[in-house]
Image (cartoon, grey):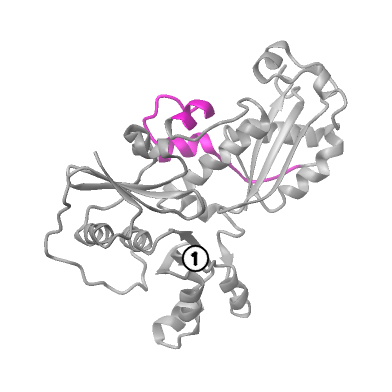
Amino acid sequence: MYAIVDIETTGGQYNQERITEIAIYRFDGHDIIDKFSSLVNPERKIQAFVVKLTGISDAMVKRAPKFEEVAKRIVEITENCIIVAHNADFDYRILRQEYKNLGYEYERNTLDTVQLSKDLIPDLPSYSLGKLCKSVGIPVANRHRADGDAFATVSLFELLLQKDHDKKIIRQSVKDFSITLKKEKLTTAIKGTPAATGVFYIHQSNGRIMYIGKGKNMRSKLSQLLAKKSKKALTIQSKMARVSYDESGSYSMARLLFNQEVATHNPRYNSNYYHLSKPVAFNHPDLIVVGLGRKTGEKSVILIENGVLQGFAYVDLEYQINNVSVLKNLLSPLADSLDNRHIVKTSITKNRVEKVIRL
């Protein structure tokens, strides 16, 4: 579970800044499940350059609650969460300082979307929140206000999770992404996996992925696996510690994700699959294949250039599809294997996609 945070402050000397506005989105990796946003009376003057940057003035915060009045709510909404922020060291330091002023030790694990972005979307000209979001086509409303910046960071973090092929972020999570699977709680674990199309991962206690499954209904597929009595199934059940999943939208995308993840993680208990040997060519060398997304308003996109699969992405805006340079920043790798080419070509020829754009 994640608490995505953005804070505006008074400015001033190090460790003497006070919060003027805070926004927090509680995010389970798939959906926003709670939100808190408020101006805060810092009980001191706001620096002039901060007023110019944020638009938050002394008059605006005069009747706002003091930090001590919102402190309990912040503790509650961030309970059992990893704090996620753009430049997390700053936001976390400010929060700790405010709680220290109240005689309370505020302790949370953190993730920094600046560093994650540098790792997962390398070679961009700038990693400031505004310029980074522009590079990947994420709209930012109310820039330099806590709620606008926090909501943009939610969208950015969702993209980073999508691009986190090694599951490094997931391995750092202890709630929701990694559902504890004890035998007496198998039913609860199954209910925690959605009846949606996608790929699911069964982890051992050390975080290693030992089995990857796919299905049009992940909950049903997981339930079937946990009910089996074969030697392999019983071994998986005895060693499993937690489960995570990625929704895919269409079953074709689930098959592509499954191929990619099995090749990446080489899970011990996945069987060897038959692979095609005949060449598969596309009817046009440069294509954008647009299909079903994971939620309303979202699209899956596959880019083919020079007859080669370049990658895939999930997008919310037509601008991200039609602007190839922006789309390339969003892409996750997709192996140009015969299996993957066959899946994509079959989806096109059997009209299982929404549209195909020739470049």
Q: Is residue 108 shown in magenta? A: yes
Residue depicted at x 23% and y 59%: 349
Q: Amino acid at mark 1?
A: Ala
The residue that mark 1 highlights is 196
Q: Position of residue 148 (x, y in %)?
A: 63, 32
User: In the image, is residue 170 above or below residue 327?
Assistant: below
User: What is the secondary structure assignment of the residue under circle 1?
Assistant: loop
**Residue 194: quadrant of the picture:** bottom right
Q: Which residues are magenta?
A: 106-134
Residue depicted at x 73% and y 48%: 77
Horizontal side, residue 77 vs residue 242: left or right: right
**Residue 21: quadrant of the picture:** top right
Q: Position of residue 119 (x, y in %)?
A: 42, 39
Q: Is residue 131 shown in magenta? A: yes
For the residue pair 346 and 341, the one nearer the viewer reads as 346
Q: Position of residue 222 (x, y in %)?
A: 48, 74
Label 1: few (<14), some or many (≥20) within 10 Å? some
Residue sticking out furthest to the top:
48
